[in-house]
Each structure stands twice: as C-alpha cells, then as structure tokens.
Amino acid sequence: MVSEFPISQFRQINGTRRMAREKVMQLLVSCSSSDISWEEIFPHIVFRNFSFLEHEAEPQKLLTPEEINELESDTRIHWEESELDFIKELIQYTLEETEFTDGLLERFAQNWELERIALMDRVLLRMATAELIHFETIPTKVTINEIIELAKRYSTDKSNVFINGVLDAVVVELIAENKLSKSGRGLIS
C-alpha cells in the first residue's frame, strides 16, 4: 500500500526566485543522473510530494499519529504562479541551450574536458547561460551571483571561483554574438 509522505499542515514558507533556481538545479541534476524526465519528478522536488511504501509494522510511540506526522513532515512551500512559470521556463531553456552551453564550456573551461567538470557545475553553468540569454529582465550580475551562491552551497570548495571565471567569459561571448539582450534601467552589466 502506498501512502503520501507527510507535509506539514501548519508550517509553510513562501517560494522565492532563489528557491526556484535551487529547485531547477535539483531537477536537472536528478534528470542528468537517471532516465527520469523532469516532468515526472517536478511534483516531488517543487511541491515536496513524496510517495513511499508503508512500513509493515509501526514502532510504538508516545505521540499520536497526527503529532508524529506533523513533527516528521516536510515544510510546505507556497509558490506564486509567476515563480512556477520561471521554474518551468528555466528548465526548458536550459535543456534547449545545452548543446550551445556545452560548446562554450569546452572553449572557456581551460584544460578541462566537459566530462571532467563536476555534474553540479555543468548544470549550474547551463542554467546561468540559459537565464542570461532568455530572461532579459534579470540583470546579468544577479544571475551570476545567484549561480555562484548555489555553487558555494552545493558544489566543491573551488566551484564558485571556477564558475565565476567561466561565466565572465560566457558573458563576453554572448555580448559579442548579440545573444545577451537586457532591457530596462540598470540591467546591462
């Protein structure tokens, strides 16, 4: 019998653009290391919907089942529709731009073959490139800073420096190819 993993009925946090990028990263890394599609795991990663097989025997506890579920539950995330759209668009653009981005990485990651670059770093660089190209209202510096923060939190000790260096070169290339189009006051780096 399958039961839903408990989600808190009382606690909730509001989703942010930073959390949205984190969820995109988690989705893309998961898909890169398995044959699963992002659509299949979207509810699990973004909405924290989990399904597990029930255990055969429940251990004896002093709390009521409802109290246990609340204590052991994950915190619900409330997403605005615009944030969900951002997540889906960033995933789609990242996947669409993979070949282009990987070509840039091979050129700008000096002395590194693409396969030797950590999966997390490749995913973050792909996300950054897609965001730089397709989200004209997000400042270049914001994109780079957000990706570097994700690298600091989830990748190797030196990934943030590596990613920063590669993204600096990518930005120069995108400008040269007229692929970096930022509109609005203060959006051009």
Image (tube, grey):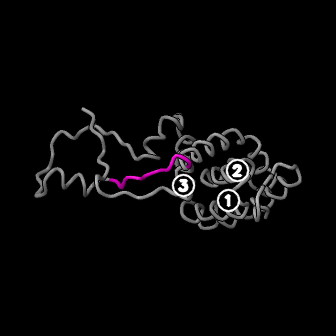
Q: Tell me residue 149's x, y (percent).
A: 60, 65
Q: Is residue 120 left or right of residue 176?
A: left
Q: CA distance from mark 1 to mark 3?
A: 13 Å
Query: Earlier along the polypeptide chain: callout 3 or callout 2?
Result: 3
Q: Tell me residue 162's x, y (percent).
A: 70, 63
Q: How many numbered circles does the render carry?
A: 3
Q: CA distance from mark 2 to mark 1?
A: 10 Å
Q: Quadrant of residue 140?
A: bottom right
Q: Is residue 106 left or right of residue 40?
A: right
Local crowd size for mark 1, using a 10 Å CA cut-off: few (<14), some (14–19), many (≥20): many
> Dot 3 corresponds to which residue?
22
Residue 143's disc is: 1
Q: Tell me residue 5's x, y (percent).
A: 30, 45
* Secondary element type, mark 2: loop
Quadrant containing the C terminus is bottom right
Is 159 a magenta residue? no
Q: Tell me residue 8's x, y (percent).
A: 30, 53
Q: Amino acid at mark 1?
A: Thr
Closer to viewer: mark 3 or mark 2: 2
> Dot 2 corresponds to which residue?
135
Seen from the viewer's position, the closer of residues 29 and 68 is 68
Q: What's the residue at 59%, 47% (across, down)?
A: 86
Local crowd size for mark 3, using a 10 Å CA cut-off: few (<14), some (14–19), many (≥20): many
Q: Amino acid at mark 3?
A: Glu
Q: Are marks 2 and 1 in contact (CB under 8 Å)?
A: yes
* Secondary element type, mark 3: helix
Q: What's the residue at 70%, 38% (across, down)?
A: 96
Local crowd size for mark 2, using a 10 Å CA cut-off: few (<14), some (14–19), many (≥20): some
* Secondary element type, mark 1: helix
Q: Is 6 above or below relative to 37?
A: below
Is 75 a magenta residue? yes
Residues in magenta, as a range: 74-82
